[in-house]
Image (cartoon, rainbow, N blue to C red):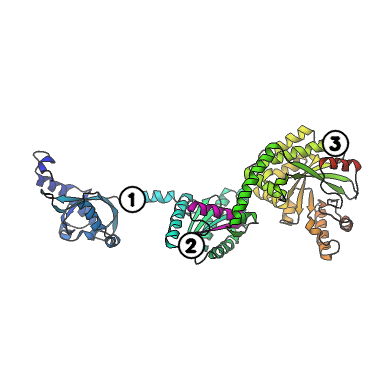
Amino acid sequence: MTPPLTHVIAPGLAPDLLLRQIYLNVRDFAIFTIDARSEVTSWNLGAELVFGYTPAEIIGRSSALLYTAGDQADGEPLQEMTLAARGERAADNRWHLRKDQSVFWADGVLTAIRDDQGQLIGYLKILRDITERKLAQDEIRRLATIDGLTGLANRAAFDTRRSEMVSQAERNGQLLLLLMIDLDEFKEVNDGLGHQAGDQLLRQAAQRIRSASRESDYIARLGGDEFGLLHLHPPSPASGGVLAEKLLQHLARPFQIGECEVRISASIGIAVCPSDADTPDTLLKKADLALYHAKNAGRNRYHYYTEELDELAHRKNTDHNELRRVLRTGDYWLEYQPILAVDGQTIAMEALLRLPDFFGQQPVDYVIGLAGELGLLPELGKGVMRVACAQLRSWYDAGVTGLRICINTCAKELLDDSYLAQLDAVLIEFGLAAGDVELELTERDAIKLERSGSRVIEQLRERGFMLSLDDFGTGYSSLSYLRALPVNTIKLDKSFLHDVPANPDGNAVVCTVIQLAQNLRLNVIAEGVENIDQSAFLAGAGCTAFQGFLYSPSLDADAATRWLRQDATP
């Protein structure tokens, strides 16, 4: 039974006077009552200020007028009354309608009113307008889910939405495609043109991804130059490839960054729910595997997840562990392939990394890539450098003269802050001069260094090291880059020698490249020379040195020493 008013109101204060003062003077809270039919039966000054209705305009009318059309359709007024009648807390946190049909966010509660016998006679509603607070909180939440640079969703929001869309696809029997998008060559732009240029590129790329996708697709920047796209209820898994092709085309168009025109590409991995994965984390993992495969396959392409990729990932993990073991135990060695001048004199030995049979037929570039992924490239490079320089010292001590050692390197290794210091330390350790060492790197790596703004190639030249472009003709083959790069030698790739000298067109290409090198005051070494006719043609065209099975395969250290002692000629 409801306690008498004398138990809850201070002595000497009449209940009617108290209620009158509340209704006439309380301005910050809307206070009103409704009967069991939801009709308004009283209305205070605060309610008039908040809703805009005078007591004469609202008393006797349904309180449903104060709710939005959506809440009325959902039966929210009745649900509040039902909760209150059961004695439960009937919180009212929602948008409400004013007389002028504008909306505000209310924070309130509805309480049942009972008579002295406990019979329900109506309800008391108390609420206040907290629209400013609500909007501020919404903005804070929005900012917490938005990537500040691109305006797309951020990683946290993407993770939440991915979980929601996987559940939705499962409930409704729909397909969900997850596309992982990674910009190729972004680091080169960021390093070469600066972070502001990189930021501009990311913003423009985000706009292009949005323009290539559907309005209903959910797109996020996941970090760095990586984006995610969720594509729900496509007609078939194949539509992911159609979308990926469209994205690749949009991102391949030139970007205008300030006064510079920049070209990049993208790699895309696609996973399908539920066929590939039925949980959010597994779906992401498999799209990541597909993306990794797309990048390794040459970039500027997309790839769907397949079960074979799981096998490759398992093999990659095993290879990682084996490479760690190899570096920890020093279980690798070098072989040496002679490089001969036109007169048959051996002028250099190229050091070639060799690994245990565990890695099978995998090319050395694959292992170099593994080392880069694990952050072990500096350690591997230093080890190769020490072994090669120690061997050269041994040959010098045995009386060999006029010989240099050629060591392969790459952009990632040269950009390591410790590289130059390590190189200097090894030379001091074995008593060698900079001119005794020739560093080889591919065109692609040389241009990555040039684009990055690094001066490491110039610094190496200034210290007296010989530098050569390996596999020339298989990368960019850009004349402007060739002119700008401070190298001494180009190594003509063996692919140029197919059908030489039998093919006139092939001969013309080779002669043109050699003539170009001579005009730029560069030496030319022909790789992969396999027969006398090739050798004679290349010598006549002006090639300065040769390397290939016609002269010698790669040799272990002992065989290489015997070769140098015999001063073998072809």
Q: Position of residue 310 (x, y in %)?
A: 59, 53
Residue 34 covered by magenta stretch = no
Q: Residue at x 49, y 65 (%)?
A: 234
Q: Nearer the viewer, residue 361 or 431?
A: 361
Residue 283 covered by magenta stretch = yes
Task: Give the label, 2 or 1, closer to the camera.
Answer: 2
Instruction: Answer yes or no: is residue 259 visible.
Output: no
For badge 3, the amino acid type reads Tyr
* Number of marks in the rendered image: 3
Instruction: Answer yes or no: is residue 290 visible.
Output: yes
Q: CA distance from mark 3 to mark 1?
A: 80 Å
- Indicate the secondary structure of the residue bearing disc 1: helix
Q: Residues within 10 Å of mark 1 (few under 14, many from 20)?
A: some
Q: Residues within 10 Å of mark 3 (few under 14, many from 20)?
A: some
- Say which quarter of the image contains residue 38: bottom left
Labels 2 & 1 near each other (Cβ < 8 A)? no
For badge 2, the amino acid type reads Leu
For badge 1, the amino acid type reads Lys
Report the magenta residues as a range: 263-292
Name the residue beneath numbered marker 2: 175
Name the residue beneath numbered marker 1: 134
In the visual, does 470 lie left or right of 165?
A: right
Q: Nearer the viewer, residue 94 or 242?
A: 242
Q: Position of residue 446 (x, y in %)?
A: 71, 49
Q: Nearer the viewer, residue 468 or 316?
A: 316
Name the residue beneath numbered marker 3: 396
In the visual, does 544 lie left or right of 104?
A: right
Q: Residue at x 87, y 35 (%)?
A: 398
- Indicate the secondary structure of the residue bearing disc 3: helix
Q: Residues within 10 Å of mark 2 (few under 14, many from 20)?
A: many
